[in-house]
Image: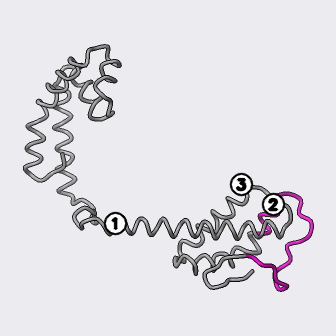
Amino acid sequence: MVANGSQLTYQPSGDEPSIGSVLNTWRDRVTALFMAHRARLETLVARRSGQREHAQDLVQESFARLFAAGSSGSLEQDTRMLYAIARNATIDSTRSRQRRTAALSGLAPEQVQTQSPSPADIAEARDTLRALDAILASLPARTRDVVLLRRVNGLSYAEIAQALGISVSTVEKHLVRGLHACAPLMSANDESGGAS
């Protein structure tokens, strides 16, 4: 095995521990590879990715992928495959982390919630939900169903009409009626700075 800068490749050397020439099953071979190469792979992955705490996860994922892929033939080929899988997993993980970092850096600070809501915010949200629940309970059943199918389930007007056996214009009327009933609560919540 050679760690060439940031390269993660396997090349046999004379000082490796012997895995044994005869292994009964694929599981035995993967277990033997794990015992012989896990620590070395973790070190290489940590060096390449720059994340020591994440290296163990990537190495375990690499062994799982190798196990699922099946044997490539000889022990040496399987070992090479293991190192290739670990290298690719590290590259994928690094690229993913870089994309997340780039996406988050493009957001304004107020777009990224960094704090948990305060107890007062939680209490206000619960009160708003209770009030909304009371309003919905006071609506006629058909109007409530239309509002919930549209706002909660995200169905289109045509889908709601088909599901309830009514016309699209009737769906629109029920939705207007339901949203009109909820409007005072929503506007009061917007004025107080809460979520709508």
Residue 20 in the magenta stretch? The answer is yes
Q: Is residue 111 above or below residue 195?
A: below
Q: Write down the residue under mark 1.
A: 104
Image quarter of residue 66? bottom right
User: Which residue is painted at 20% across and 23% down in the image?
Assistant: 172
Q: Write down the residue under mark 3.
A: 68
Of label 1 and label 3, which has the lower sequence position?
3
Q: Is residue 171 above or below residue 135?
A: above
The span picked out in magenta is 10-33
Question: Under tag 3, what secondary structure?
Answer: helix
Using the image as rendered, state which of residue 172 and residue 124 is in the foreground.
Answer: 172
Q: Is residue 73 left or right of residue 126?
A: right
Q: Write down the residue under mark 2.
A: 72
Residue 32 location in percent, x, y? 80, 68
Q: Is residue 177 left or right of residue 96?
A: left
The three-letter code of the residue at mark 2 reads Ser
Residue 21 location in percent, x, y? 92, 69
**How many marks are shown on the rendered structure?**
3
How far apart, in angstroms, are the residues tagged by discs 2 and 1? 40 Å
User: Which mark is on residue 126?
Assistant: none
The three-letter code of the residue at mark 1 reads Leu
Q: Is residue 130 above or below residue 5?
A: above
Using the image as rendered, state which of residue 15 and residue 9 is in the foreground.
Answer: 9
Question: Under tag 1, what secondary structure?
Answer: helix
Depth check, mark 2 against mark 3: the one in front is 2
Residue 121 location in percent, x, y? 19, 55
Image quarter of residue 90? bottom right
Of label 2 and label 1, which has the lower sequence position?
2
Depth check, mark 1 against mark 3: the one in front is 1
